[in-house]
Amino acid sequence: MPDPIRRIFTATLILGVPGAGKTSLLATFAEYLWETFGKILLLYSWDGGAIPTDLQKRMQQGLIRFWRARTRSGEGLGIEGLMLATKGYWPAKINPETGETSPAVRLVPPVTTLYTVSCRKTGETLAQLPGSQLIAPTYCTPCKTLHAVAELNVVEDVHRTKGFELVGGVAFDGLTSMGSLVLDHMDESRGAGQIGGEKSAFGGVVISGSVKFGGSNRADVGFGQTRARQCVHNSLSIPYLVEGPVFTALSMEATDEGGLPIVGAKLPGRAATDEASSWFGNVYEMGKTTDEAGAEHFALYLRPFTDPQNRRHLLKTSASPTGLPPILTDPIGQPWAQANLGLVYRLLNADLARAVAEQLPGAPGMAATPTEYGEPFQLLPSAHPAPTGGTSPGALPVLTPPVPFTTPAPVVPVTPPAGAPPTVTARKRARVDPTPTTMPTTTTPTTTTTTDAAPQLATVGPPPPPGMKPPMKAPGS
């Protein structure tokens, strides 16, 4: 039965030396998926190690689907296979017993999007296309009409791809080999002259028949580290998983920035050893421990620790401080009873359930949390204006922008002085006469007026045009 509380999962990394039991631990992951959710595991393998009996048993029972990814060995397809596989792609045709495929097998995504195109008049389905950019004018035989794209009904359908219905988890074995594959690709590409840059240590191209190798340089190592990180991030985008993706990797001793010895994932270059743990939510280490009687037990380390050689193991967990023990050790004669990845996930589920039970007073809870946000907006059909500018029932009137209105300036009335005779103003020409002319003026006595009266002219002049104030002095005064 599925857990009532869905834990927010993340990617998990399993470290260990060769033979520590990392791949066998993936069988316990498949058992957990089936017993808890009724789902199966997709196992992608780039590693050259053995496939343990426990894992092959679950393959025969159908709980694990295994792909030996290096059998897709077409030239130049290595990095493409990494990028697509870590997004959940799977071979279109595969041998389920051996996990082998053809060298250039097509990879299919876990989710398929189809666009169904139909005729609006007859409802006849005209096409089913994988992309909206492929929709074009289509001829409908029943109505004998070539419809434009705007005249077609298009329905988008997103669904799980055929064959992925039972998939609930993915595992990648292993991250060390995936990083090495990137360096191999760069080596071959440099030998073929496809990339340049810094020369390798031997400074030339190694040729053997039709095979050419150009070696690797520091830029290739950085490129390999970046691709390894990208593979981990890609896996977090795989849809419909019920538990987070799991990666395995060889462990490696290195030093951190302070010069202290550490143990982390083995990747291209030593610089990524202390950084790789930050790409994952859980980092565990599979190994062995010895009891007082000298007997060895498989053990799964869940929390960071310092070993007798004073090396810090870069492990971590997403559990609470008391949610997981530091180590799970198998009893004698009971392999995978405690060193069990499914048991770890069950402990994480129980840890979350205990934490959620400690409710804050008045907390609304998940049931009151909305799944949609934003205000809905709707434009009714009757609110659309008539397309031709005419009137129709329920149509809105077509509005025109208003003409800007300018208030005219007020006209100031001018009152000439008392007793001033009317004066005729001569019409002025556009051309200026070089000979100055003097107009006769008549001097009149000025009278004192109140402050409310308009200012008086010193001399009599022509009345100003409408809307203009009179000059304070007459021309020529």
Image (cartoon, rainbow, N blue to C red):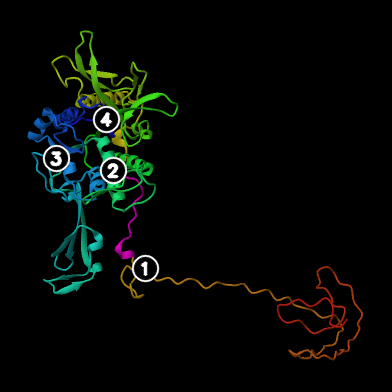
Give whichever of discs 1 and 3 has the lower sequence position: 3
Q: Which residue is mark 1?
A: 396
Q: Nearer the viewer, residue 156 or 427?
A: 156
Decide: is 17 above or below 191: above
Q: Nearer the viewer, residue 464 or 132?
A: 132
Give whichever of discs 3 and 4 has the lower sequence position: 3
Give whichever of discs 1 and 2 has the lower sequence position: 2
Q: Is residue 129 visible?
A: yes
Residue 182 numbered tag: 2
Mark 4 is surrounded, within 10 Å at the Cα level, by few (under 14), some (14 to 19) or many (20 or more) other residues, namely: many
Say if mark 3 contacts mark 4, CB within 8 Å: no
For marks 1 and 4, give the CA distance: 72 Å
Mark 3 is surrounded, within 10 Å at the Cα level, by few (under 14), some (14 to 19) or many (20 or more) other residues, namely: some
Give whichever of discs 1 and 4 has the lower sequence position: 4
Residue 241 numbered tag: none
Q: Which residue is mark 3?
A: 166
Give whichever of discs 4 and 2 has the lower sequence position: 2
Residue 250 numbered tag: 4
| Type of the residue with mark 3 | Leu
| Type of the residue with mark 2 | Val
Say if mark 4 contacts mark 2, CB within 8 Å: no
Indicate the secondary structure of the residue bearing disc 1: loop
Residue 273 covered by magenta stretch: no
Q: Position of residue 234 (x, y in %)?
A: 29, 42
Q: Position of residue 62 (x, y in %)?
A: 9, 36
For marks 1 and 3, give the CA distance: 54 Å
Mark 2 vs mark 3: give the one in front.
2
Say if mark 1 contacts mark 4, CB within 8 Å: no
Magenta segment, which residues? Answer: 371-383
